[in-house]
Amino acid sequence: MSEGVERESMEYDVVIVGAGPSGLAAAIRLKQLAEAAGSEISVAVIEKGSEVGAHILSGAVIDPIALTELLPDWKELGAPLETPVTEDKFLLLGPQGSVTLPMFAMPGFMHNHGNYIASLGNVCRWLAQQAEAAGVEIYPGMAASEAVFDADGRLKGVVAGVFGINKDGEPGPDYQPGIELHGKYVFIGEGVRGSLAKQLKAKFGLSEKSQPEKYGIGLKELWQVPDAVFKPGLVQHTTGWPLDNNTGGGSFLYHFGDNYVAVGFVVHLNYKNPWLSPFDEFQRFKHHPEVAKHLQGGRRISYGARAISEGGLQSIPKMHFPGGVLLGDSAGLVNVPRIKGSHNAMKSGMLAAEAAFAAIQAGRAGDELVEYGEAFERSWVRKELNIVRNAKPMLSKYGTAVGGALGIFEMWTTSLTGGFSFFGTLKHGKSDAASTGLAKDYEPIVYPKPDGVLSFDKLSSVFLSNTNHDENQPAHLKLKDPAVPISENLPKYGEPARLYCPAGVYEVLYDEAGQNPKFQINFQNCVHCKTCDIKDPSQNINWTTPQGGDGPNYPNM
Ligand SMILES: Cc1cc2nc3c(=O)[nH]c(=O)nc-3n(C[C@H](O)[C@H](O)[C@H](O)COP(=O)(O)OP(=O)(O)OC[C@H]3O[C@@H](n4cnc5c(N)ncnc54)[C@H](O)[C@@H]3O)c2cc1C
Ligand code: SF4
């Protein structure tokens, strides 16, 4: 905390951290409500990306249910959801072959007809235009780096826009102390593993009654392919190879827009083998004939990675606390079997907006928006998450084959009975960090070399994420104890940060004699996926915000 620093402050009715679907939907709803009531409401949205969308990475097949509630005329308004799903496939992959699972075996909510394939980054850019047209103030390139509390310990705002701190942590010649943005209510829509959300959950004990949060890492590439292989509207999901039965995950592949194929791979972060590299699993996955044929003759134009919330209903923390609320993925609202969270994120933003607007109209400020929690309990988001609540614990407990089959049976049962399950509500067990096994108990994995056509190395991949961090600032990846990577993680786990980080940020370097290992953090490469904050087995890495505007610059992910 930067105590003693003098800063100017700006007052708003509502301050929203994060211009993702949750934050932007909240902002638009607040303005709609004010207009309908003939009153005013001031709303500021803070975004750490250099522009709205720069840090957004998603699939994305979008269920338009929330968008239709928010802006029923989204088609006329030109929302970039231009590719309706036309074909929906689910494959179980083996090393060479595959088995197609018939879609009729899946409950209806797993089908994708009626959904749209899009770049979520572009959807957010468009939502930001709608918000600005309604009078919302959006500040991209500003990281909310600290929470600000009032004398009673209630969240009253955030510090944003601190620039120019030198590598040594001292103010440099271009130092700007930032400003405090105060709100009657502060919405935290930072997405998965938000850095402020993490602090607020700890301060207010928000996760005390919920299961550990669970996550996956999602890696994605955007390709542009020739007409001969382009099948607009095709959605393909896979499970199985190259992951073994005890390592959860799967892939997505979507044809959309201007001859684009979005191809992505998710590995559940409760994997045990510390030698596993999600990046290299993704690269070899693309060589499977059922994947390679979709990329043939194409060109990779973008790369990135982002963690994805997988805890579901059991892991949702308390979503409100004095002065603020958690939205979207900051509360873990992703429906894992559907690999969809953007519609739930938007709806949560709308529900929070409705609760905050009513409270502000009633003259309240800085208290707990319990009405938001109550509205969430009654919402279709909760119903949807309730139906799939056991899918992820089943995969973790019984493996991909048995757990997957049980999961389908379970989802039929819950969807036909409105939520009843023979299994009750299963627990998740250990955190993802604690699930990591010891290096001595596993064989190191030798990954094939990339061929430069379908598969690539990490550094040329990070190049395509347009990631940039001012080098003259302190590393935003903070080690609680700098000795731990070499003294604990290396002997016990082979220092898995080298492997799980999708951007080559962490390295263990040796001297010429192969001795004296040294841990190096190339923070400039960080794509803000948050995996290290989640998976480090010693929980020694704390992801904090770098200077605003730094990080990836995804064009259309
Ligand atoms: C690989 C992958 C595939 C997915 N596929 C799909 C799919 O096909 N369909 C679907 O519906 N969902 C999908 N999802 C999930 C979906 O992307 C999320 O549920 C959704 O983006 C959550 O929205 P959000 O607003 O909560 O957070 P986000 O979309 O993550 O947005 C958060 C924003 O807050 C900003 N931010 C964070 N911290 C700060 C800070 N301290 N200061 C300022 N700004 C900050 C970030 O830069 C970001 O712009 C996928 C996710 C992944 C990772
Ligand atoms: S340093 Fe951490 S947050 Fe950054 S890319 Fe690597 S794993 Fe992701």
Image: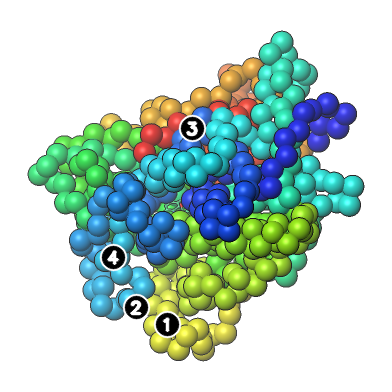
Q: Amino acid at mark 2?
A: Pro
Residue position for label 2:
107
Mark 4 or mark 2: name the one nearer the start of the chain: 2
Mark 3 or mark 1: name the one nearer the start of the chain: 3
Residue 94 in picture, x, y percent from top left: 28, 61
Residue position for label 4:
114
Residue position for label 3:
51
Foreground: 498 or 200? Answer: 200
Residue position for label 1:
415
Q: Nearer the viewer, mark 3 or mark 2?
A: 3
155 sits to left or right of 439: right
Q: Amino acid at mark 3?
A: Glu
Q: CA gap, disc 3 to disc 2?
A: 39 Å
Mark 2 or mark 1: name the one nearer the start of the chain: 2
Mark 2 CB near ligand 1 (8 Å cut) = no
Q: CA gap, disc 2 to disc 1?
A: 7 Å
Q: Mark 2: give few (<14), some (14-19) or many (20+) Cα within 10 Å.
A: some
Q: Amino acid at mark 4?
A: Gly
Q: CA gap, disc 4 to disc 2?
A: 15 Å
Q: Amino acid at mark 1?
A: Ser
Secondary-structure class at tag 3 = loop
